Image (tube, coloured by chain):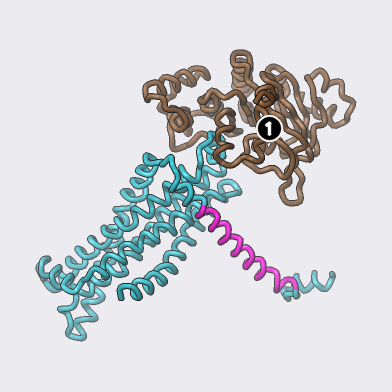
Chain colours: A cyan, B brown
Amino acid sequence: MPTNAISGTLGYPNARGRDLPFRSIFVKGLEWFGELGIFFARVFRAAVTSPYELGELLRQCEAIGAKSLPLVALAGAATGVVLSLQTHDALSRFGAKSLLPAVIVFSIIKESGPVITGLVVAGRVGAGIGAELGSMKVTEQIDAMEASAVDPYKFLAATRVLACVLMLPLLTLAADFSGVIMGWLANNLADPISFRLFLDNGFKSVQFSDFIPPTLKTACFGLIIGIVACFQGMRTTGGTEGVGRSATSSVVLSSLFVILADVVLVRLILMLWG
Amino acid sequence: MDSKSNAEPIMIDNLYKRFGDHTVLNGITLHVKHGETVAVLGRSGIGKSVLLKLIIGLQPSDAGSVKIDGQEITSLNFQQLNEVRKRIGFLFQQAALYDSLTVEENVAFPLSRHTNMPVADRAKRVKELLAGVGMEQDLEKMPSEISGGMQKRVGLARALALDPRILLFDEPTAGLDPITAAEIGKLILELKQKRQMTAIVVTHDIRGAKTFSDRMVLIHEGNILADGPLSDLQKSKHPFVIQFLRDSS
């Protein structure tokens, strides 16, 4: 015992000290995924069984979709401008400036638009849901709802998750649109080109598989953001500090899983529609 | 069915609840008769609020039985439990009003979900409920715009919305000034006299409990240490009962 105490003080890890944190983190990670799976099953069952909370769903679509629109459009526009400036310089060096519209359009609709939308919504909506539900949990509002014989998984979680799933593809369209417009505008300042010609050149080679699957994959991002944020919010403990933790973890985890899911979905889309 | 309808509204038998290594309720037994109001007393953190949450199924018990109107609730599924919950009103310690809804919407929430009332009738019912707790002037206010005492009044109106037969109060007077606490106590007494409701009131306010409760139970170390009217508790020779009553007065 004294040896352990001294080595602990000096920072020499003993056998138990070296083993336990890793095992503990691993077990906690598995528990988290298990609880997330149970939560997802419960939310899914609540979403597909009547009565349906259509009024609350519309309210959430407005809160998640309409209120995220300016930020998503701005992020898309910034991406379009940066893409245009960077690729203009690069393509000029190789004498391939005529490819600029196609590069901008392809980059935005295939990857930048969906991923930027996913990450922006994960930040804005993930934090919002995590904090709102976390606050409701610690102030017993979720208990009060359950005591009123209203299923919080249906009223609070299913509506938010569904709204995320429905709104993400629409927000992606907005990001794509503003990205292409601003890409043209930035390009137009350096090399004037009509908008129609820009679009003709940009979309000339675009096919169904270039546009629809990447846009619809953001529905998966919406599912991830909604589920992770609701889960983190509804398991909040520890008062206002816990609410802060839930909001942060909602953003961090949903962003991380959006990026990981993007890798898997891009591979899947290439396999199916490559 | 007869045995159910004749059963006492709340029957808790041998109920256990643990959180990790900590035993909160250690085989508690409590029966509440129709129209009776029971005040549950005890030190903070002893499990009084947990007891209320077990009665309404917000937390699962580890062992034991909870019967509402003769119906065992520990074995019910979610839908069946919700049917029982509609017959129970619950006033939370901090009122737990939905902070994104107005006062009016908070009280209308259970009505809009569990009744087919036309909108006009629902609005009328909400006004009646709020008038009953003296809050009819604040329909459009948000919970953050009203005081703690007012929030508890609105919480009480919401708890009464579905006309429950059983009411559970979690520290209804905690954190309130003596005048507001007395007003809440008066409202509980009025409910008891007018509606013949069965109620369990978790409280530290012995003086208030004396006015509205028929009997008091004192929880200590996970079980009921004393049970009866205040006069009976005052005759107890148990050192904890003596100390609790002395320090509370």
Query: Which residue is at 72% across, 18% downward?
Result: B214
Say few, some or many: other residues with alpha carbon within 10 Å of mark 1 (under 14 / 14 to 19 / 20 or more).
Answer: some
Quadrant of the rendering where the C terminus of chain A is positioned? bottom left
Residue B221 at x, y = what percent? 80, 39
Query: Which residue is at 15% across, 68% downward?
Result: A199
Q: Amino acid at mark 1?
A: Lys
Whether residue A135 sits left or right of residue A12 in the image: it is left
Q: Which residue is mark 1?
A: B67
Query: Which residue is at 10% across, 70% downward?
Result: A197
- Vertical arrangement, residue B101 with respect to residue B198, above or below: below
Where is residue A107, by image quadrant? bottom left
- Vertical arrangement, residue A18 with respect to residue A125, above or below: below
Residue B148 at x, y = what percent? 55, 29
Residue A152 falls within the magenta-colored stretch: no
Q: Secondary structure at mark 1?
A: strand
> Residue reaching furthest bottom?
A94
Quadrant of the rendering where the N terminus of chain A is positioned? bottom right
Q: Main secondary structure of the magenta part?
A: helix
Residue B240 at x, y = what percent? 84, 32
Depth order, front residue of B224/A95: B224
The residues colored magenta run A16-41
**From where the camera sits, is residue B186 visible?**
no
- Vertical arrangement, residue B220 with respect to residue A5, above or below: above
